[in-house]
Image (spheres, rainbow, N blue to C red):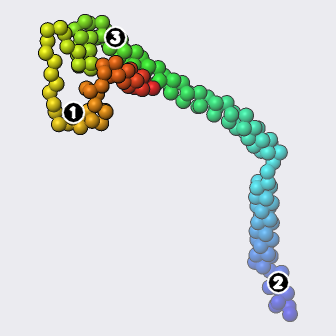
């Protein structure tokens, strides 16, 4: 037994026991630190609350801003289209103010013939099919053709 007691209280055994105890203490202190670090502190919770509040408070104004920008872009596009349409109508008005153009269109649409001229119509097979589809536009009175032209122009504007 004396040999075992000597081994038990030897310096090497004591150093080994001290090393094991120290390692156990270090491990326990590291786990405590990690446990403290993983917990949510009051400051961190307050910061998270402030950030969430800012996100919620800014979400609606940002959505409104994006929607208004899209609406502005749509209105600008419609304005550009309206300006193009106005320019086309100005060109058309200028053409109609020319007597030669107006006479040409009247002759074409109403089959108008000036006094002393002989009127004739060239029959094209495709035009015959189309005129039958138009219910015989050449066979109707001129005022029916005029009224149909007004109706078609009105429908084109819509």
Q: Which mark is residue 93?
A: 3
Residue at disc 2, secondary structure: helix
Number of other residues with Cα within 10 Å of mark 3, as a class: few under 14, some 14 to 19, many 20 or more: few
Q: Nearer the viewer, mark 2 or mark 3?
A: 3
Q: Which mark is residue 127?
A: 1
Left or right relative to 111: residue 18: right
Q: Which mark is residue 46?
A: none
Number of other residues with Cα within 10 Å of mark 2, as a class: few under 14, some 14 to 19, many 20 or more: few
What residue is rendered at 68% in x and 34% in y? Answer: 60
Q: Closer to the N terminus: mark 2 or mark 3?
A: 2
Q: Which mark is residue 8?
A: 2
How many angstroms separate mark 1 from mark 2 (CA)? 123 Å
Q: Nearer the viewer, mark 1 or mark 2?
A: 1
Q: Quadrant of the C terminus?
A: top left
Residue 87 picture location, percent across and down: 36, 14
Residue 33 picture location, percent across and down: 78, 57
Residue 137 visible in the current orientation: yes
The image quarter containing residue 15 is bottom right
Q: Closer to the N terminus: mark 3 or mark 1?
A: 3
What residue is rendered at 37% in x and 15% in y? Answer: 89
């Amino acid at each position: 037994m004396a040999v075992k007691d000597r081994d038990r209280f030897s310096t090497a055994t004591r150093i080994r026991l001290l090393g094991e105890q120290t390692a156990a203490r270090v491990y326990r202190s590291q786990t405590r630190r990690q446990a403290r670090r993983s917990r949510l502190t009051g400051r961190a919770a307050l910061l998270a609350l402030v950030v969430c509040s800012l996100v919620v408070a800014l979400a609606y104004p940002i959505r409104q801003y994006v929607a208004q920008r899209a609406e502005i872009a749509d209105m600008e596009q419609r304005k550009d289209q309206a300006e193009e349409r106005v320019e086309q109508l100005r060109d058309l008005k200028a053409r109609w103010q020319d007597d030669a153009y107006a006479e040409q269109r009247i002759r074409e649409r109403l089959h108008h013939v000036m006094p002393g001229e002989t009127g004739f119509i060239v029959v094209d097979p495709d035009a015959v099919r189309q005129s039958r589809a138009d219910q015989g536009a050449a066979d109707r009175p001129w005022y029916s053709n005029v009224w149909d032209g007004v109706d078609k122009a009105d429908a084109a504007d819509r």
